[in-house]
Image (cartoon, rainbow, N blue to C red):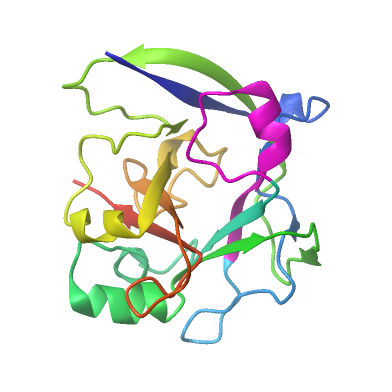
Amino acid sequence: MHKVTQLLIDPDVLNHNTGIWIGGEVAYVTNWPLNSEGQPLLHLFSIDCNTLLQQHHILSSLPPDKYISVFSTYSASDYFLDQVTYTGDELEWKENILAGGTYVSVSSEPLTSVCPIQSIPLCGVGLTEIEIEEKDFPAFSFFSSMLPNGVNGISHLLEDYQFVCQIYSADFPNPYQDILGLSDANGYLLLRTGPASAQAPLDGIFFVQTA
């Protein structure tokens, strides 16, 4: 058994700032990110690390004094899963992660920009600590310092990046439950643990995997 912090996405908890929120038109980024086709990415969620750490001390993988926003390619009508997936393949790394199919902004100042496209309706996030079995493949969103079962092909990243959280597509509000390409897809956020290098050029990585 080990403890994880489950995310409970709820449009009705906006008056309680837990330090993480879903969607909304404002994100912690200076210049709004674009994918390789020049399309603005969709803001998935943002984290005020200090606020979140004050409430949930088991979140050891979060860096203090940082502001994080996570973005992804999304289309309500066109297939896009192949643009956000990473399973350890070198071509996926170059064409999806490095080319901007997804994007993670990590900053020391809470500077924000406004989304140039229609955004996910702003949702608050409740947090609760639960225990899961070592053999479980959890189908929900949660923070954990341990890599969850079901993530494939990324052991090489763990020398430079720390797993932070799993985001489950179906947890998002309607009509965005396919926000990660399929309703049963998982998104994974990893943050760099040291200085930038050729092996770890990005402050953070977000990618999708699905069975």
- Is 65 drawn above or below residue 13 in the view shown? below
Residue at 57% of width from left, 37% of height from top?
173
Q: Nearer the viewer, residue 127 or 197?
A: 197
Residue at 78% of width from left, 60% of height from top?
109
- From the viewer's perspective, is 84 left or right of 156? right
Q: Quadrant of residue 71?
A: bottom right
- Is 131 drawn above or below residue 56 in the view shown? above
Residue at the bottom extreme, as displayed: 37
- Is 47 drawn above or below residue 19 in the view shown? below
Q: Nearer the viewer, residue 2 or 137?
A: 2
> Magenta residues?
42-64
Q: At which x and y percent is residue 134?
A: 20, 20
Q: How many marks?
A: 0
Residue at 54% of width from left, 16% of height from top?
128
Q: At which x and y percent is residue 113?
A: 79, 67
- Is 69 drawn above or below residue 21 in the view shown? below
Q: At which x and y percent is residue 123?
A: 69, 37
63 part of magenta stretch = yes
Of the 4 image quadrants, the one containing the N terminus is top left
Residue at 66% of width from left, 38% of height from top?
20
184 part of magenta stretch = no
- From the viewer's perspective, is 48 left or right of 186? right
Q: At which x and y percent is residue 148?
A: 27, 35
